[in-house]
Amino acid sequence: MEPTDPRIGARITPRLIDSLYTEAMLLADEARGYFDEAGRDERMTLDPFARVGFACESLKVTTRIMHIVAWLLTQRAVESGEITGTDGRRPERRLGHAGTSDEAIVALLPAAARRLIAASSDLYARVARIDEQQLADEPATSPARALMGRLERDLVWIKH
């Protein structure tokens, strides 16, 4: 990253957390409404392969949103002093892994499903950048400790 990058040293503000939380909750409600209700009729018009893809993608949308909300709640807990910043950056409290969508399958789905998939992917990517930036902004540690931290985070993901 260039030293002139404005994100260096940037702090996650309560306003940003609240804004992302509101966006995530609105998206969660919209996704639930679509996948549980309106999308059901559209799903039935798809061929069997696309129906399975529809089900898988709806789970991916839900997983992305779940991880985003959990991460944002952790950020709120840090901001309010319920947990320390160090505890908030522990591997198990970082943004959880969410699978990417298969573009070939997504192309087979109705427009409303594609829009929700894209919106959840976009929100997840934005939060992931913030999460990574938080880690990058931590005081420098030894290369061995940094490697151990990455391994620990990856192992937590593999366990789940």
Image: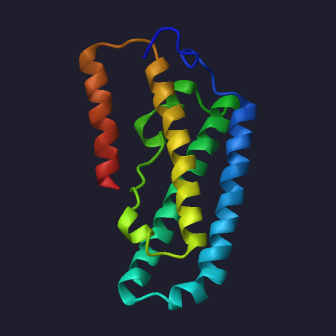
- Residue 3 in picture, x, y percent from top left: 48, 8
Nearer to me, 90 or 46? 46
**Residue 99 vertical placement versus 142 (above, below):** below
Residue 52, image x, y percentages: 39, 81
Q: Is residue 17 left or right of residue 146?
A: right
Picture layout, residue 132 above or below residue 45? above
Instruction: Locate residue 12: give its quadrant.
Output: top right
Q: Position of residue 50 (x, y in %)?
A: 40, 81
Residue 75 sits in quarter? top right
Position of the C terminus by quadrant:
bottom left
Which image quadrant: the N terminus? top left
Rendering quarter of residue 140: top left
Residue drawn at the location 68% of the way across and 37% of the way down: 17
Exactly how many numbered labels are in the figure?
0
Residue at figure coordinates x 73%, y 49% from the top left: 22
Q: In the rendering, at what x and y percent does residue 93 appear?
A: 49, 40
**Most foreground residue, 106 or 135:** 106
How is this picture coloured?
rainbow
The residue under the point 46% across, 31% down is 132
Report the residue that reaches farthest toward the top: 3
Q: Is residue 51 above or below residue 81?
A: below
Where 7 sits versus 106, above or below?
above
Which residue is painted at 45% across and 12% down in the image?
2
Left or right relative to 15: residue 76: left
